[in-house]
């Protein structure tokens, strides 16, 4: 039996009524005073899949209304459409009577043995042992906080950019991301980690400005294949930073080199 990690227990939801769930939001996933958005998406994904006849969230779109804090929260779900191929579930997180986050998830069941007819090649990312750890959020977060929940290893070029050892002309970060070995390592279910993985990295705008909290307004991500266990290779990019807004696009590949997830979010440049 695979032991339960902190992430597994921190995202556990408990059914308390028809279409209603309770969750205890783990303070270890705070970014400052706000819960990490990827962690919240992982929680809502569990509630949505509990209402679906299908196993996988293939397309998930979330709107972030206000920050969540640690502690108890409630979830309400609503099946918008139930089908043989796709079931669509709407799920909403509440805290102290206020709407925190809403998500609409299209769920289906993917074949874990499916072979792609076409796949764009994975970018050339150095082996993980050649990568290094640095994070512009380090001095702003407690040692046993969010950065202790994940392991992020950056390629030499990305490390140099984050450490301000080189000037960036095109914002891009590459490397590897996984749940922290301190918390038990990879998730019992690699699929459950993907919502957190697409939102676990330092904001891409950190390459251009000093780090500050960059709140997500909307994030959509797609599941493209069933990942095998282990660290995920990532590439994070940005197309435009303007008027206090920026986009962040993250692609994830598993240990086979298979593209398993793609995300795009719109966020505010921190103030």
Image (cartoon, rainbow, N blue to C red):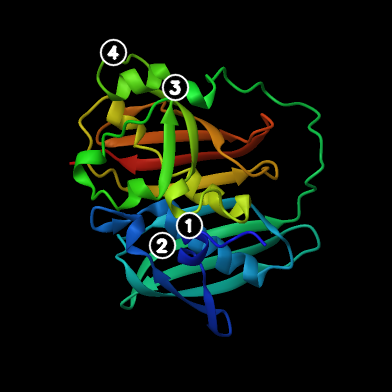
| Residue 192 placement, left or right of 92 | right
Determine the residue positioned at 22% across, 28% down. 209
Q: CA distance from mark 1 to mark 4?
A: 34 Å
Number of numbered discs visible in the structure rendering: 4
The residue indicated by pointer 3 is 155
Judged from this view, the residue extending furthest toward the left is 271
Q: Is residue 219 above or below residue 77?
A: above
Earlier-in-chain disc, 4 versus 2: 2
Q: Nearer the viewer, mark 3 or mark 4?
A: 3
Determine the residue positioned at 48% across, 57% down. 41
Determine the residue positioned at 76% across, 50% down. 110
Query: Crowdedness of circle 2 by 10 Å Cα count: few (<14), some, many (20+)?
Result: many
Place of residue 171 in the rendered image (x, y in percent of width and height, measured from the top left)? 37, 22
Earlier-in-chain disc, 1 versus 2: 1
Place of residue 36 in the rendered image (x, y in percent of width and height, measured from the top left)? 36, 53
Pointers 1 and 2 in contact (CB under 8 A)?
yes
- Residue 216 seen: no
Q: Is residue 220 above or below residue 16?
A: above
Q: CA distance from mark 4 to mark 2?
A: 37 Å
User: What is the number of the mark on residue 230?
Assistant: none
The residue indicated by pointer 1 is 41
Pointers 4 and 2 in contact (CB under 8 A)?
no
Q: Nearer the viewer, mark 1 or mark 2?
A: 1
The residue indicated by pointer 2 is 101
Residue 162: image quadrant is top left
Q: CA distance from mark 1 to mark 3?
A: 27 Å
Q: Quadrant of the C terminus?
A: top left
Place of residue 250 in the rendered image (x, y in percent of width and height, measured from the top left)? 49, 35
* Secondary structure found at label 1: helix
The residue indicated by pointer 4 is 166
Pointers 3 and 2 in contact (CB under 8 A)?
no
């Amino acid at each position: 039996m695979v032991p339960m990690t902190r992430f597994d227990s921190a995202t556990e939801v408990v059914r308390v009524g028809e279409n209603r769930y309770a969750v205890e939001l783990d303070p270890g996933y705070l970014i400052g005073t706000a819960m990490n958005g990827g962690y919240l998406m992982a929680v809502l994904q569990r509630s949505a899949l509990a209402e679906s006849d299908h196993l996988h969230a293939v397309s998930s779109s979330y709107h972030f209304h206000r920050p969540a804090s640690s502690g108890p929260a409630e979830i309400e779900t609503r099946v918008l459409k139930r089908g043989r191929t796709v079931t669509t579930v709407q799920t909403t997180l509440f805290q102290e009577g206020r709407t925190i986050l809403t998500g609409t998830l299209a769920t289906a069941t993917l074949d874990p043995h499916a072979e792609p007819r076409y796949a764009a090649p994975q970018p050339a990312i150095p082996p993980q042992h050649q990568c290094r750890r640095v994070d512009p959020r380090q001095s702003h977060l407690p040692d046993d906080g969010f950065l202790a929940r994940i392991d992020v290893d950056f390629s030499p070029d990305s490390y140099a950019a984050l450490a301000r050892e080189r000037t960036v002309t095109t914002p891009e970060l590459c490397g590897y991301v996984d749940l922290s070995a301190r918390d038990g390592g990879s998730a019992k279910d690699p699929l459950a980690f993907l919502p957190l993985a697409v939102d676990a990295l330092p904001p891409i705008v950190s390459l251009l400005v000093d780090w500050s909290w960059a709140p997500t307004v909307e994030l959509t991500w797609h599941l493209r294949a069933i990942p095998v266990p282990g660290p995920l290779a990532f590439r994070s990019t940005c197309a435009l930073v303007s008027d206090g807004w920026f986009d962040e696009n993250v692609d994830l590949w598993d240990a086979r080199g298979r593209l398993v997830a793609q995300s795009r979010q719109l966020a505010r440049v921190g103030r």
